[in-house]
């Protein structure tokens, strides 16, 4: 009979996620993961499988949270076009933490590092990015229906363009670009694309 787990799985996965996020998949060692979680190799592998499975589990949770976060941001108050504009208003880093902002997106970082080598990471990225694109396409279509975007607007085309801008701003944040410059890029893109 297996012994009951004596750790909080969500806390462990959060610690693992942060370790992979800080160092990347390849540079994160098993020792790093054991230190971050306070668990031994047997406990980690027994509960989650090997390093790769542990990474995929943490990445999958992160990806799901990203989609929900964007969904919630686009479901706020106001017209569809107002919600779209608000989604491109880049916030200040939490507590002014520039290091937090320069971490970038775990999914984008992982895709850059591993997509050419790891079909499961690539599949996770494609599925997540498609879900985000679809959310943007849906709200663009709603903005067209509400009369706030031109009737000839192709929602899929504009949704993809908005997604590309959002990913570009996120990438630039990882380079350490000033938050004020990132906000200006987001606002300029919204002003140009969401008239």
Image: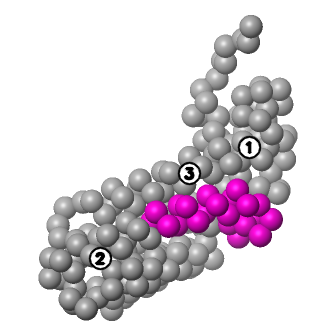
Residue at image point 39% right, 80% down: 156
Per the picture, the main secondary structure of the magenta-coloured stretch is helix
Are there few (<14), some (14-19), or many (20+) residues within 10 Å of tag 3? some
Residue at image point 19% right, 61% down: 77
Between label 3 and label 1, give the one nearer the viewer.
1
Residue 19 visible at all: no
Residue at image point 72% right, 28% down: 47
The outermost residue toward the left is: 147
> Could you say whether the residue bearing mark 1 is in a helix, strand or loop?
helix
| Whole-percent x, y for residue 6 in the image | 66, 18
Q: In what quadrant of the picture does the N terminus appear?
A: top right
> Along the line of sight, which residue is nearer the eye, 141 or 88?
141
- The first of marks 2 and 3 along the sequence is 3
Structural distance between the alpha carbons of marks 2 and 1: 37 Å
Residue 44 visible at all: yes
- Whether 131 is among the magenta residues is yes
Are there few (<14), some (14-19), or many (20+) residues within 10 Å of tag 1? few
* Marker disc for residue 53: 1
Answer whether labels 2 and 1 touch (C-beta < 8 Å). no
Structural distance between the alpha carbons of marks 3 and 1: 14 Å
Q: In what quadrant of the picture does the C terminus appear?
A: bottom left
Instruction: Tell me the residue that label 3 is attached to.
Output: 62
- Residue 174, image quadrant: bottom right
166 lies above or below 98: below
Tell whether 131 sits left or right of 6.
left
* Marker disc for residue 140: 2
Are there few (<14), some (14-19), or many (20+) residues within 10 Å of tag 2? many
Answer whether labels 2 and 3 touch (C-beta < 8 Å). no
> Bounds of the magenta span?
109-132
């Amino acid at each position: 009979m297996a012994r009951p787990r004596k750790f909080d799985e969500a806390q462990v996965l959060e610690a693992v996620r942060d370790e992979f996020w800080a160092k990347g998949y390849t540079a994160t060692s098993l020792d790093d993961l054991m230190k971050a979680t306070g668990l031994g190799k047997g406990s980690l592998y027994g509960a989650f499988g090997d390093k790769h499975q542990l990474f995929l589990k943490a990445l999958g949770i992160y990806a799901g949270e990203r989609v929900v976060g964007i969904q919630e941001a686009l479901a706020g108050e106001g017209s569809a076009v107002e919600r779209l504009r608000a989604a491109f208003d880049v916030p200040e880093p939490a507590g002014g933490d520039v290091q937090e902002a320069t971490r970038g997106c775990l999914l984008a970082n992982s895709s850059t590092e591993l997509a050419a080598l790891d079909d499961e990471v690539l599949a996770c990225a494609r599925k997540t990015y498609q879900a985000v694109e679809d959310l943007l396409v849906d709200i663009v279509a709603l903005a067209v229906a509400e009369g706030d975007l031109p009737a000839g607007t192709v929602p899929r085309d504009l949704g993809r363009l908005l997604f590309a801008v959002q990913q570009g701003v996120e990438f630039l944040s990882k380079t350490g670009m000033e938050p004020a410059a990132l906000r200006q890029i987001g606002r300029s893109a919204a002003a140009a694309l969401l008239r």
